[in-house]
Image (cartoon, rainbow, N blue to C red):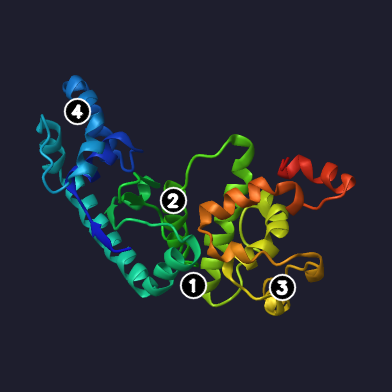
Amino acid sequence: MNTNFVVNDYILIWNLLFGTSITESIYKLKQKIWKNYKDEYNSIFKDKDEILKDYKNFIPNNDDIYNIVMDNEEYKKLKKEAEKYRLELMKIWDKNKKETNALMKDIIRIKIPDYNFFIINKELNRIDGDRNGNLIIGKNINPNFPLSILLKIAIDITNRHLKNYKEEDKKFKNAIVELAIINEYGTRLTGKSCYQNGSSSLMSLKRWLYPYWLMYLGVEKDKFLSYMMRDQIAFEVDKYAYEKQLKKMNLEEFIDFCIRNQRYIVRETKEEREKNNNNIELL
């Protein structure tokens, strides 16, 4: 997956107009525009999808509001901050490009298009986009764990390229996406196990899935013990038949396999099931 990091005026302005007012000046500007250009303000709401389709050649039907914002001094300041943020993201991405490409090829195993990353101000606190290789990114970079921004991006992209699941099956989908991104990708990024990280509500389910997840990754059965020790997740190896076909699946196929076989995979006693249903809601 190749990536292109872009700060685009139209995308940035659209998000400033329809997102959180991140400064007092922008709030006042939005109020002024709304008061004087209410119809035009409403009409440009649909522009986002058009910009993403072809950002290099996008021409608004009415550019009055865009021009007003571009001429504003506060906007010029915010655009410079977005450019700085873009460089921060590029540095993190480029430094970890090998592991990220391995995630897509070896773990997700789904064809992912090249992506345009449209960078907006991180104070807007959003990730948005489409399935056609466009992602809008505006999230804070955690100074204590800057790699977390890569996890957020990878989770968003992965979810966009998976099919929609029934409500009762989403726990399995979410747990397996966490295993792929937060746990395995996180482990490869940091060089230490991240398998205790993630949503507390999914932790029990992920433990049940873990033996099959190792098979999906292609880990040989005689290596299970070393992985269990590394990740601090224990299971009785001899109670699990080795499912050779799992390592040939992509992530979506593996999710479907786990959903179909959930009663076999989740080997709870009646008492354990009653205890865990309040938090996990598996069945």
* Label 1 close to label 3 by CB (< 8 Å): no
Camera-near label (3 vs 4) is 3
The reply, left or right, for residue 263 in relation to residue 187 is: right
The reply, left or right, for residue 163 in relation to residue 133 is: right
The reply, left or right, for residue 165 in relation to residue 119 is: right
Mark 3–mark 4 Cα distance, whole angstroms, equals: 59 Å
Write down the residue under mark 1. 189
Of mark 4 and mark 1, the one earlier in the sequence is 4
Mark 1–mark 3 Cα distance, whole angstroms, equals: 19 Å
State the image coordinates of residue 89 (x, y, percent, origin top left): 33, 63
Residue at 46%, 66% in the rendered image = 103
State the image coordinates of residue 61 (x, y, percent, origin top left): 11, 30
Of mark 1 and mark 3, the one earlier in the sequence is 1
State the image coordinates of residue 165 (x, y, percent, origin top left): 54, 39
Q: Which mark is residue 175?
A: none
Secondary structure state at the residue bearing disc 3: helix
* Label 2 close to label 4 by CB (< 8 Å): no
Tag 3: amino acid: Met
Tag 2: amino acid: Asp
Write down the residue under mark 2. 156
Write down the residue under mark 3. 228
Give the camera-side residue of 135 and 235.
235
- Tell me if mark 3 has few (under 14), some (14-19) or many (20+) residues whose alpha carbon lies within 10 angstroms of its own: some
Mark 4–mark 1 Cα distance, whole angstroms, equals: 45 Å
